[in-house]
Image (cartoon, grey):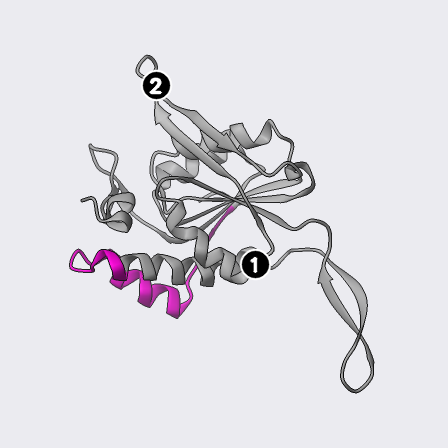
Amino acid sequence: MTDNAFIFNHPLIRHKLTHLRDKSTSSKEFRALVTEISALMCYEVTRDLPLEETEIETPVAAAKGSIIAGRGFALVPILRAGLGMLNGVLSIIPSAKTGLIGLQRSEETFEPESYYCKLPPDISERDVLVLDPMLATGGSAVCAVETIKRHRPKSIKFMCIIAAPEGIKCLSDAHGDVKIYCAALDDHLNEKAYIVPGLGDAGDRIFGTD
């Protein structure tokens, strides 16, 4: 395991993840679980956000408080499965701006490449959180991070629900400055590059297209 990867061990996340993996879980339940797990993970991912002091008036007296310094986060889900995590994170940091990255496999190189990228215009002043439920081979994550880095954000973090060791190594080798947050680290990839034991195709299960 690399120094920049963080695996969650919270009882609530582990409980919900068990139901998420279950093949009998419906698409409706699956979407709700992805949202809930993403919200729980977001609490820890945002632990190091910088704060600045401010003064307010309560109904009783003047008081000092803290607010997040700077422009805060930009959330960038990787299409399409990353959309399933977006509402959960927005429920915790509703002021975050949202971008989108679409990736497809090149017919020539068979490597992922960006076909769509729409990012907030002030992304250079923001910390970016990339969202994708699965970190399998790591190819899509590397491509997404490379695309975002061209816009020079303050920092980039990657948040997934399930990761394979191969994916963590790939992303860490390519972008050692990107912190990786996972709800679970699974065993390996099979011959079809599916995470084992995993949960199947996250996009299909979120959108009911399996």
Question: Which element type, helix, strand or loop, lies under badge 1?
Answer: loop
Is-magenta flag for residue 102? no
Per the rendering, the mark at residue 93 is: 1
Q: Distance between the residues labelled 1 and 2?
A: 35 Å
Q: In which quarter of the image is the C terminus?
A: top left
Residue density around tag 2, few if under 14, some if 14–19, many if 20 or more, within 10 Å: few
Is residue 57 toward the left or the right of residue 5 in the image? right
Asked if residue 6 lies left or right of residue 81, the reply is right
Residue 144 location (% of width, % of height): 47, 32
The residue lying at 39 percent from left, 29 percent from top is 103
Closer to us: mark 1 or mark 2? 1
Disc 2: which residue: 106
Amino acid type of disc 1?
Ile
Magenta segment, which residues? 5-29
Q: Is residue 58 left or right of residue 75?
A: right
Where is residue 101? Give x, y as percent.
Answer: 46, 34
* Percent x, y of residue 95: 60, 55
